[in-house]
Amino acid sequence: MSTDFSIKPVGAPVATHILPAAGDAARSAVATQLPPSQSVTAVDSNAAIRNDLQSSSDFISRQAFFDRAAASVVFQVIDSRTDRVVQQFPDEIVLRRRAYFHALDLSKSEPTRLVATDRKA
């Protein structure tokens, strides 16, 4: 096992085949007339596709707090429009399980009693 933590290439690079977008059968197909409700239009491939989450992140807030019953830190993503939890780590069921076992551990331990072992002279 290597200890230098570097990524090393394995084997020779493999050439990938690029397939044409439309075959000869699609180019020579007969045009059909369909009503607009049943037809499909091609998407403009030149149009820019955006995956912009910034507009939805305006309504997202994040918080972290310590759950004393479960004795663990909880991270939450909250939708500020509805004040609902969108995502949480650890899950609610995990927190309940941790709180249950934490309460069991606390009930098993005996309360510490001071025992007088020193003798007075």
Image (tube, rainbow, N blue to C red):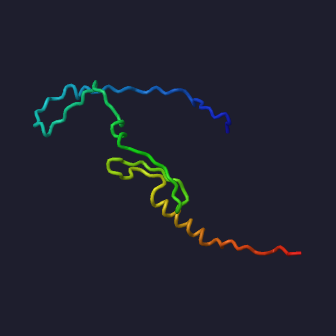
* 2 or 102, nearer to the observer: 102
| In-image side of 72 versus 4 (left or right) | left
The image position of residue 111, as x and y in percent, is 66, 72
Q: Residue at x 52, y 67 (%)?
A: 100
Task: Name the foreground residue: 118 vs 120.
Answer: 120
Q: Residue at x 52, y 55 (%)?
A: 66
Q: Position of residue 11 (x, y in %)?
A: 57, 29
Q: Nearer the viewer, residue 6 or 18?
A: 6
Q: Residue at x 28, y 24 (%)?
A: 46
Give the residue furthest to the front. 121
Residue 64 vertical placement versus 47 (above, below) = below
Residue furthest right in the image: 121
Q: Which residue is painted at 38% across and 50% down in the image?
A: 86
Farthest residue in the top direction?
Answer: 46
* Front one among 22 and 45: 45
Q: Quadrant of the C terminus?
A: bottom right
Side of 45 relative to 5 (left or right): left
Count of numbered badges drawn on the protein: 0
Q: Is residue 56 left or right of residue 69?
A: left
**Which quarter of the rendered picture does the N terminus lie within?**
top right
Q: Quadrant of residue 4?
A: top right
Q: Position of residue 89 (x, y in %)?
A: 47, 52
> Is residue 35 found left or right of 59 in the rendered image?
left
